[in-house]
Amino acid sequence: MGDESLPVFVFGCVSCGKTVAGTEKTCPRCGASFEDVKFECPFCGELVSPGQTKCEACGTEFASFSSDVSDTSLVELDGSDYIANEDAPEPSTPPEKESVEYECPNCGKPVGESDAQCPHCGARFS
C-alpha cells in the first residue's frame, strides 16, 4: 500500500509502442532497454528522464496522465518518438524519383515517356 502514494506515469516503448510504467527499466513485451531513453513532456517538448515525476522546464506533473491509460494501452508511434532515443536509427525515406519530361519535337508541348503519338498535335514517334 505504501507504493500507491508514489506518482505513477507512463510512456510508450520506443520499439513496440506498449504503454510502460515510467519506473520500468525494460519493456515487458519486447525487452527494449530504457536506461538511456528520454521522453518528451506532452506540453513543452522538453526531454525528460523516465525517473522524473514532473517536467523541470514547465512544471507539468506526469502522474496526472496515468488515469488515462491502462496496462493494455498502446501508444501509436509516428517516427518522431525516436527523437528521444539517441541510439534509434533515423527513419528512412525512399529517394524521390526524378521527374523526366519529354517534349514533342513537332509542337514543343509535353508528352509522356511511353506515348507513341503527341496528344496535342498528333505527331507520331518512332
Image: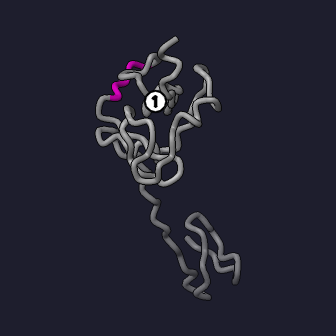
Q: Is residue 33 magenta?
A: yes
Look at the picture and state if 26 lies above or below 101. above
Look at the picture and state if 114 lies above or below 53. below
Rendered location of residue 33, percent (x, y) = 34, 25
Which residue sits at x=49%, y=68%?
Answer: 99
Rendered location of residue 30, percent (x, y) = 43, 19
Which residue sits at x=52%, y=74%?
Answer: 101
Left or right placement of residue 24 versus residue 8 in this view: left
Nearest the viewer among 92 and 55 is 55
Task: Provide the residue designation for mark 1.
Answer: 13
Furthest residue to the bottom?
A: 107
Which residues are the magenta region?
Answer: 30-34
Which residue sits at x=52%, y=11%?
Answer: 1
Nearest the viewer among 53 and 27 is 53
Q: Residues within 10 Å of mark 1 (few under 14, many from 20)?
A: many
Name the amino acid type tagged 1: Cys
Rendered location of residue 10, percent (x, y) = 51, 30
Q: Hey, which quadrant is residue 85 in on the image?
A: top left
Q: Hey, which quadrant is residue 26 in on the image?
A: top left
